[in-house]
Amino acid sequence: MPISRRYFVSALGLGGAGLLSPPLFGGRGHEARLADWLTSPALTPQKAGLIRLDSNENPNGPGARAFEAIRAMFGEANRYPDAPEDALVAAIAKEHGVSEENIILGCGSSEILRMCVEAFVSTAQHLVTAAPTFELPENFAMTMGRPVVSVPVDARLRLDLDAMTNKAGGAGLVFFCNPNNPTATVYGDADVRAFVARIRRESPATFILIDEAYHEYVDDPSYKSAVPMALTDPNLIVSRTFSKVFGMAGLRAGYAIVHRDTARRLRRWRLGSGVNVLALGAATVAIGDHEHIALEQKRNRDAKAFTRAYFEKEGYEVGVSETNFLMINLRRDMRPVREACRREGVAVGRPFPPLNTWLRVSIGTMEEMQKATEVFRKVLA
Ligand SMILES: Cc1ncc(COP(=O)(O)O)c(C=O)c1O
């Protein structure tokens, strides 16, 4: 049988409407789920024809090799996933040229983010984050009653690294999303190193979590992953995910690369067996499937260029984007526009205060973006 999304869905018996309970404080922050499902129960992800440009997922799903691995793993569903975990850790270590001791798996990178907040943020040692950035660390810290200092992005929608550094004194954890969700901006290697060095000088005990969820989408040549830094600096953690370019957001797999001493400390906060066997099987082959990654990068680049050209031609300011989503300044409250788009069958990003006039549009397939731009044209007319 050919491997296809239809096969995958029917094999898992997910064709029905099954609306799951939303998480209390969001596996993906509020990644389009909690508020939407509560306020618009009819608008399930399965709603026929809905174009999902709201959660920065890869619309094409996993590659053929990953699908094959998922199918092969069905037979392991009755077993705890110890051996498949070892296989994924080995594959990640090989891909990065690091030791297996440097890897921690997570149920999505969300679990890594949660572990870092639990391990390093306390009532005495605050979290430094940004506004807006990926909300999950802040949400966890606030739910746990731990102090949070949130630093607004600058006028170019970039994380304000100087201001974040100024707030880092005595902090337990600094969350540095690079590229940043939702603003799609990225810092190059020199800036990242300078930021880390300054925090090291001024607050040596502070941990820095560099979230590289969108790493594979970056085109900026000045960018480099912080993974090499994490191997020598025990206070630096790099998180990665299989939810974006790998197309596996629904499977839930992510990981951290850290110094082995920090890995030992962080692992205590892990949910044992948190990654399911299907995700483990898929991720183990996906991480080395460079052909598939290159294909997805190209598809994203092409559909993003098309979408950018549409908005710019219409006279809107579009932010730089080193990710699989765009920020567009509508110069008016984005909320009614978002609602109108939903009524027309296109789901777009939630509000990201204080950027209340900016709309985040995730990049779908070219066909989806062609249809979506017709909806944007109608709604924005
Ligand atoms: C920057 C960033 N980090 C982490 C996550 C969590 O991803 P996951 O738990 O699916 O790996 C997301 C999800 O959108 C994200 O945008």
Image: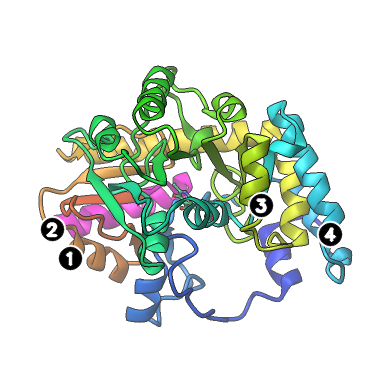
Task: Calculate the distance from the C-alpha at mark 1 to the C-alpha at mark 3.
Answer: 44 Å
Q: Quadrant of residue 324?
A: top left
* Residue identifier under label 2: 333
Q: Which residues are magenta?
A: 362-381
Indicate which disc residue 336 carries. 1
Tell me the chief SS of the magenta region.
helix
Amino acid type assigned to the residue bearing label 3 in the image: Arg
Q: Work out whether mark 3 precedes mark 4 in sequence or the reverse, and give the earlier one.
A: 4
Q: Work out whether mark 3 precedes mark 2 in sequence or the reverse, and give the earlier one.
A: 3
* Residue identifier under label 4: 73
Residue shown at 70% from the left, 59% from the top: 275
Eye-nearest disc, 1 or 3:
3
Q: Is mark 2 within 8 Å of ligand 1?
A: no
Task: Calculate the distance from the C-alpha at mark 3 to the C-alpha at mark 4.
Answer: 25 Å
Residue shown at 86% from the left, 71% from the top: 78
Indicate which disc residue 267 carries. 3
Q: Quadrant of residue 94?
A: top right
